[in-house]
Every structure is written in structure tokens, then in C-alpha cells.
Image (cartoon, grey):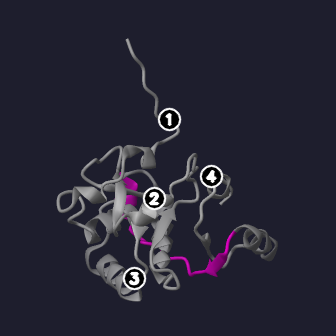
Amino acid sequence: ANSLKRVNTVHQLAVLITPGVSQPMRQQLAKVFNVVKEVDVLDSGDEANLALIARPELGVTFTKLHCWNLTQFSKCVFLDADVLVVQNCDELFEREELSAAPDVGWPDCFNSGVFVFVPSKDTFKALIDCALSQGSFDGGDQGLLNIFFKDWPTKDIKKHLPFIYNMVSTASYSYL
């Protein structure tokens, strides 16, 4: 939230928290965020696919699906907790659902650390139904979201955000 405030976003800030967040932390979050919403932990329980990418902790990233329940908003931009905003990105609100940046490792898939979405209880239910019927190819939210929004790679290139929305701390360039 601090990085968003530092770049002067004009939009409200919401954070999803799980029941394990302490009361003192909730009070601190309420000082920074306009909306602090408690949600239940959602875990894929997909040990096999999580093992394929050696990231067993990513099962609980299904919890982010609750963002589709933020129906008091007409459009939102989801940012993972580890996203550092270095310049104003309010222009993302002009994008359509589901706009996202290509994943560094799998460019035919989008990265789910930053994406534009339209809150909808119907979409949330459809995502949960998809998770139960099809699962996730990586055991986490990113695999599920790429299955659900399967036309992202080819249908509308305008929904592809620039790679700068998925920079990783280890990215570097060198010139000979």
C-alpha cells in the first residue's frame, strides 16, 4: 500500500486478510487501506502439481480468488503482496478483465501477480467450480486462472500487459 500511495494512486486500496492476522496488525492495515476484508483460506490441496514446481506453499494462493467478491467495486487491479509499485499505474483501470502480463517462464500464460478484474460473485463461483472440476496445472492460483481465462494468449492482445508489470528482482540485462 505504501508504494501505491507514494506514486499518488487515486483509487481506493483494499486488502484481503485471513483469520490468522492479529488484531494489532488489522489495526495497522486499517490505517493504510480503505477496505480490510477477512476471507477464509482457500487451498488447492494439489500436492502432486505443487511438487512439480517444487513450491508446496503455493496451494494457499487460491485464497486470492476471494478478490472477485469485492463487489462494492466495479473494477479492480489485483497486486500480490510482494509487488513493489515504482510508478503510478492507475492506467490499469482502463484495461479490461482479464488483463495481465505474460509469465517470465511460460509466456503463453499470464502471471497472476498483477491483473485487472471485474468483481463478480458469479465469476467467483465459476472459478471455484473450475477448481473442483479441472484443478490447476501448477497447483496454485496462476494455473487455475490460466485454465479459466484460457483465451488470454490468443483472443485479445490488448489484454496483454507489458512485461514491466511482471519484473522479478533477479532480472538483469547485460551487453557485450
Disc with the residue nearer the chain's start (4 vs 2)? 4
Q: Name which residue lies at 69% across and 56% down.
A: 2
- Label 3's element? helix
Give the magenta-colored segment's residue range: 33-52
Rounded to the nearest angstrom, the CA distance separating label 1 from label 4 is 23 Å
Disc with the residue nearer the chain's start (4 vs 3)? 4
Pointer 1 and pointer 3: residues touching (CB < 8 Å)? Answer: no
Which residue has dot 4 on it?
7
Disc with the residue nearer the chain's start (1 vs 3)? 3
Pointer 4 and pointer 3: residues touching (CB < 8 Å)? Answer: no
Pointer 1 and pointer 4: residues touching (CB < 8 Å)? Answer: no
Q: Name which residue lies at 40% across and 76% down.
A: 118
| Mark in the foreground, 2 or 3 | 2
Rounded to the nearest angstrom, the CA distance separating label 2 from label 3 is 25 Å
Q: Where in the figure is residue 31, as x and y percent of width and height?
A: 77, 70
Q: Amino acid at mark 2?
A: Glu
Viewer-side residue, 33 vs 123? 33
Say which quadrant the N terminus sits in. Answer: bottom right
Q: Where in the figure is residue 126, as x and y percent of width and height?
A: 32, 83
The residue sitting at the right extreme is 24
Residue 37 in magenta stretch: yes
Which residue has dot 3 on it?
124
Q: Amino acid at mark 1?
A: Thr
- Label 2's element? helix
**Tag of residue 170:** 1
